[in-house]
Image: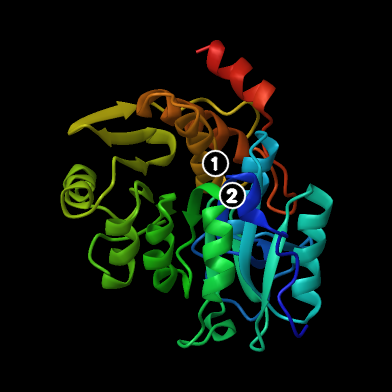
Amino acid sequence: MSEITNVPGDVTAAGRPIDVLVLGGAGVDTIVRVPELPLPYADSYMIDSGIRTRAGQTGDFVAVALTALGLRTHHLDFLGDDPEGDLVRALHRDQGIPLTAVPQPAGTKRAVNLVGPDGRRLSLYDTSRTHPGDRFPEDTLRALAEASRHAHVSLTQPCAEALPVLRETGVTLSTDLHDWDGENPYHEPFAYGADVVFLSATALRDPERTLRRIAGRGRAEVVVATAGDKGAYVLADDELTHLPAVPPPAPVVDSNGAGDAFAAAFLHAWLNRETPRRSALFGTIAGAHACTVPATETTAIGLDELRRRAAAL
C-alpha cells in the first residue's frame, strides 16, 4: 500500500457531511477463551472453543456502533499492507463505513485477548506496530475534521499529536481513557483536551476525585466513568450523578467492546441534544448489550432496539 485511500472528494463543499470522525484504534484481535483469569502457569492449555482472529479494536468497535445507530461515520487510521490490514478494510467495507487508511510500514495494530468464563478479558497489545514519529497527514486530518460534526479520538499513538489540529477546526472532541489510573501522563493530553471524556473506574481509587480533576483542568463538559455492574458515574455542570447498571438482555459472554458501545450510544444521544444523564442511560443499555455478544463477532445494538429498551426503563 503506497498511498492514502478512501479520502472523500471535496468534503468541505457539503458542509458537515460526517457526523463522527473516528480517529485511530483500527486493528486486529486474536481471541482466546481461557478456563479462568488470571490464568495459572502451565506448559500448555487445550482451547476447545478455538483461537480466532478478527478485525476490531477500539476505534473499529466505536465506528461500527455509531454506524449501527445511524450516524454518518468516517474512520481514519494507519494500516499495514498485510493480512491484518485486509481484515480491517473488509470489516469497514462490509459494515459500510468509509475508511481512510494511512500506510503503516510497521504493520497493522494487533492484540491478543484472553477471555474468561465470566466475560472478563486480559488484553496483550503489540506496541511494535507504531513509531514515535508517526503523524497523520495534516491536510487529510484537517479536511476530514472540517467535514465532521464531532471527532472521537482513540487513545493510540499518534492521536495525541492530532489534537491541536482538530481543535483548530472547531470540531467537538471525545476520547476514551479506558483503564487510566489517573496518574499516567500519557493520558493527560486526551483527558484535558476533549469535550466529552470516557474512562473506566477499574483502576481508580476515588472516581469522583479523578472526574472532577479532569473537568477542572481540562475543557470537558461531561466526564463519564463506567463501572461495569456498578453502573456509571456522570459529572456535568459540577454535579455528579450515579446511574445503576442495566441488566443485560442475555447471559454475559464477553466484556470486550462494552466501553466502545457505551461511548457510541452516549455520543448518539449527546449529539442529538439529550441530557448527559439520558445519554449515559443509552450508554449503559448499549454496553450491557455488548456484553452478550461473543468477542468473535463484530455487531452492535441498533437504534430501534436501543430506544425500545430505554423506553422500558
Closer to the N terminus: mark 1 or mark 2?
2
Residue 74 point in image, percent of width and height: 65, 53
Viewer-closest of 159 and 137 = 137
Helix, strand or loop under label 1:
helix
Q: Is residue 137 above or below residue 98?
A: below
Residue 77, image quadrant: bottom right
Mark number for residue 307?
none
Asked where in the image residue 177 lies, by quadrant, the reply is: bottom left
Using residue 232 as the reference point, say whether residue 217 is left or right of it. left
Total marks drawn?
A: 2
State the residue position of label 2: 62
User: How many other residues sit within 10 Å of disc 1, few (<14), some (14-19) or many (≥20)?
Assistant: many
Q: Amino acid at mark 1?
A: Ala
Q: Tell whether 110 sits left or right of 98.
A: left
Q: Position of residue 198 (x, y in %)?
A: 39, 47
Where residue 174 sits: x, y (%)? 42, 50
Name which residue lies at 38% across and 41% down: 227
Q: How is the image coloured?
A: rainbow
Q: Residues within 10 Å of mark 2 (few under 14, many from 20)?
A: many
Residue furthest toward the front? 13
Residue shown at the point (59%, 83%) measured from the top left? 129
Residue 255 visible in the snapshot:
no
Q: Residue at x 75, y 71 (%)?
A: 5
CB-based contact (under 8 Å), mark 1 and mark 2: yes
- Name the image quarter holding the N terminus: bottom right
Q: Report the side of 208 relative to 101 (left or right).
A: left
Which residue is denoted by mark 1 in the rendering? Answer: 264
Q: Circle 2 — which element? A: helix
User: What kind of residue is marked 2?
Assistant: Val
Q: Which sits in the foreground, 207 or 215? A: 215
Residue 245, horizontal then vertical, whole percent: 43, 29
* Residue displayed at 70% across by 47% down: 294
